[in-house]
Amino acid sequence: MLKFFYASGTCAMAPHIVLEQLGCPHEAVRLDFSRNEQQSPDYLKVNPKARVPALVTERGVITETPALLLYLAQRYPEGGLAPLDDLFVLAQAQAFNSYLCSTVHVAHAHRRRGTRWVDDEAALESMQRRVAQNMTECFDLIERDLLQGPWVLGDRLSICDAYLFTVTQWLPGDSVDVSRFAKVADHQRRMADLPAVQRVKALHA
């Protein structure tokens, strides 16, 4: 059975949603970051990066959200959560998830984890002041050019939707009003209605 490590408020919600949506048998283990459990010797044996998500499989551990999402979609192709039959659309899905991982997540992280990049107090404050603007610009692009509607890839629910839903959850904390993005807000409502999402949200509360 798969073993999945997650923490509340993190990008681990995305593969957790996919696990539930696909009905994958798995054991979910919640880490408490407030108690620094991600730095425990036992967890560092699982993921020496000391981050979530991490998925323990029969062949070893997989980390990084985009990798987990694609792995699950490929492991359970009958779930139809990735366009595995269309290389171009699959590449578009990977491009979207990579943008969330490499750009949007980093912009968000500047609010609470700026010490990853600088240790000067003035620089930290400057970075934090830019978070709302940077996240707004990211979601302007998603709204205008990347979210096809009603789902990210059009009419087909995919792994991209779980990831977008997760990242959109962070906007209020970043002082960004989700309602300014009509398509994104509609996407959030659609996702929130899915039973799998409701189950995962309860576990991450």
Image (tube, rainbow, N blue to C red):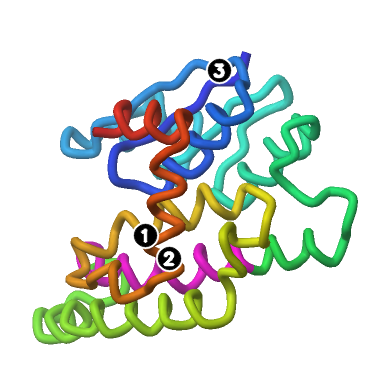
Sort mark 1 into few (<14), some (14-19) or many (20+) by Cα contacts within 10 Å. some
Q: Residue at 41%, 75% (x, y): give it.
A: 139
**Circle 3 sits in a helix, a strand or a loop, which is it?**
strand
Q: Is residue 135 left or right of residue 147?
A: left
Sort mark 2 into few (<14), some (14-19) or many (20+) by Cα contacts within 10 Å. many
Which secondary structure class fits the magenta region best?
A: helix
Q: Earlier in the sequence, mark 3 or mark 1?
A: 3
**Which percent across, then down, holds residue 196?**
48, 30
Mark 3–mark 1 Cα distance, whole angstroms, equals 25 Å
Front: mark 3 or 1: 1
Front: mark 2 or 1: 2
Question: Where's the C terminus, which quadrant?
Answer: top left
Which one is nearer the viewer's eye here, 205 or 49?
Answer: 205
Q: Earlier in the sequence, mark 2 or mark 1?
A: 1
Magenta part of the protein: which range? 96-114
Image marks 2 and 1: residues in contact by CB distance under 8 Å: yes
Question: Which residue is under mark 3?
Answer: 26
Question: Which residue is under mark 1?
Answer: 168
